[in-house]
Image (cartoon, rainbow, N blue to C red):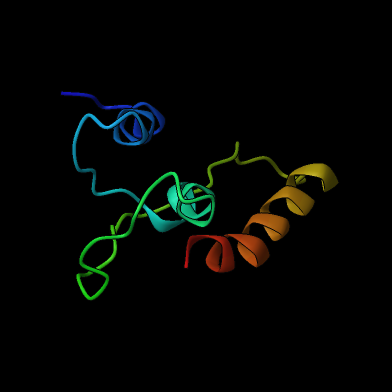
Amino acid sequence: RLDDLDAIADAAVGGMGLAWLPRWLVRERIQADALVELLPDQPRYPYDCHALWLQTPHLPLKVRLAVDALAAGLPKMMA
């Protein structure tokens, strides 16, 4: 048993068995024909994604920009 998603994907590419993984993680491997999508009508791999930062009186601009970039880009990437 593995708890590292990249290791599971690598094991599947290596022919070690089936893997149920997030689409964003295996998209490039599927496009490169290293993996084959089975059961495309099954529900996707669901999980939550959270961003945490230290609560301070003034949020640094670089933190605000990082949070905004994640909020804008992650939904498309994880679809």
What residue is rendered at 60% in x and 36% in y? Answer: 54
Q: Nearer the viewer, residue 16 or 58?
A: 16
On screen, residue 7 above or below 33: above
Tally of numbered discs: 0
Left or right: where 30 falls relative to 64 = left
Q: Nearer the viewer, residue 53 or 48?
A: 48
Quadrant in which residue 18 is drawn: top left
Q: Nearer the viewer, residue 75 or 26?
A: 26
What residue is rendered at 27% in x and 32% in y? Answer: 15
Left or right: where 64 falls relative to 73 = right
Residue 6 locus on image (x, y percent): 41, 31
Residue 33 locus on image (x, y percent): 46, 51
Q: Nearer the viewer, residue 70 or 31?
A: 31
Residue that extends furthest to the right in the rendered view of this protein:
61
Left or right: where 59 falls relative to 34 = right
What residue is rendered at 31% in x and 48% in y? Answer: 21
Quadrant in which residue 5 is drawn: top left
What residue is rendered at 24% in x and 49% in y? Answer: 20
Residue that extends furthest to the left in the rendered view of this protein:
1
Quadrant placement of the N terminus: top left
On screen, residue 56 above or below 36: above
Residue 31 locus on image (x, y percent): 52, 56
On screen, residue 35 above or below 46: above
Residue 68 locus on image (x, y percent): 71, 60
